Amino acid sequence: MNSKRHQNLQGYSFMMPALLAILFFTIVPVVYAFFLMFFKVDMLAGTRNFIGLDNFGKIFEDPKFWASFYNTFKYVLVVVPIQTIIALALAALLNNKVKFSRGFLTVMFIPTLTSSSAMTLIFMWLFNNNGLVVNTIDDLFGIRLEFLTDPSLALTVIMIMNIFSTVPHFMIVFLSGLQDIPDSLYEAASLDGASAFKQFRHVTVPQIMPITFYVVTMGLVGCFQIFDQAFIISNGTGGPQNSTLTFSLYIYQLAFNSNDMGRATALAFVLGAIIFTVTYIVNKLLKADEVNG
């Protein structure tokens, strides 16, 4: 009995640094933020006044909230399906023993290794009003598009950049899942007369459903929390005309520009509830927790 208790104490002692880090840098801030969302907080003056649920009322009455809501959901609905499909297609291509696949894999993975800030600056250079992409489109089609200053196009640049930088990582994840599928399943399907498309639909897709759920979930969480690209491209304003204003950028503006930490924490919990709800729905739709036959 004493030996078992000693082993338990040893285990907890090894875990203690990680547990303390989680406690002080995750649990305590979340609890404090939950406390703050019911107050009007002035961080500079160091004062707070209890106002109940008024912070939520102010959020839902603010047109910037609905602009960030629209932009974020538009971003999620476009980026997540496209990056998932492209990643799966490239993984399937590599899994079929394409020549030079290792070199292709190395080149494809470079965007994921590049920092988000550096990638954003590169895309700003490509898509600015005198950038390579704008000039190329102008030379080929005679159309002058101003991506970064046009409210209908600014968010598109961030979408393209996110897809470009996240596809390689998800491609590797899909590839690992594809390589774990037993060849015997494909052989059995082939003997039953299944075409390549039917094998993909009835063998590959069900077998990689847990991987697909992981990719979609990570894509959803990342897209809902998009901040740095929108901040850098708009210089923190969410412009032009709030077209790149996202939930996370709006939270930043409330906390550090408007000095309203109460509303910022309230919006953070709204965002958390949205992410949890959407993830739960995706889990039920993909049935990732079921055993795939």
Image (cartoon, rainbow, N blue to C red):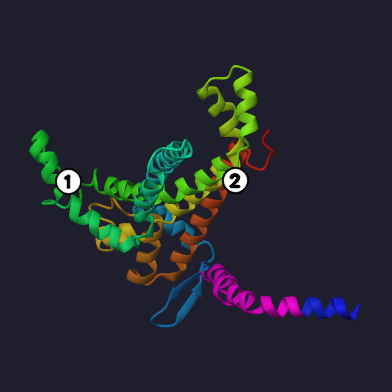
**Is residue 293 left or right of 70 when viewed as pictured?**
right
Work out whether 160 lies above or below 53: above
Q: Residue at x 35, y 65 (%)?
A: 253
Work out whether residue 46 or residue 165 is closer to the camera in this orientation and state it. Answer: 165
Q: Residue at x 87, y 79 (%)?
A: 3
Q: Which quarter of the figure has residue 79?
A: top left
Element assignment for label 2: helix
Q: Residue at x 51, y 48 (%)?
A: 173
Residue farthest along the right direction in this orientation? 1
Q: Amino acid at mark 2?
A: Tyr
Asked whether residue 199 is in view, the answer is yes
Residue interval drawn in magenta = 10-36
**Is residue 4 left or right of 243 when viewed as pictured?**
right
Residue farthest along the bottom direction in this orientation? 45
Q: Which residue is mark 1?
A: 133
Mark 1 crowd level (few <14, some 14–19, many ≥20, 10 Å Cα): some
Q: Is residue 16 magenta?
A: yes
| Mark 2 or 1, closer to the camera | 1
- Please identify the quadrant where the N terminus is shown: bottom right
Q: Which mark is residue 280?
A: 2
Work out whether residue 68 or residue 47 is closer to the camera in this orientation and state it. Answer: 68
Q: Position of residue 83 (x, y in %)?
A: 41, 43
Q: Position of residue 46 (x, y in %)?
A: 44, 82
Q: Is residue 94 magenta?
A: no
Q: Which mark is residue 95?
A: none
Work out whether residue 208 or residue 120 is closer to the camera in this orientation and state it. Answer: 208
Work out whether residue 182 or residue 279 is closer to the camera in this orientation and state it. Answer: 182
Main SS type for the magenta part? helix
**Is residue 189 left or right of 90 when viewed as pictured?**
right
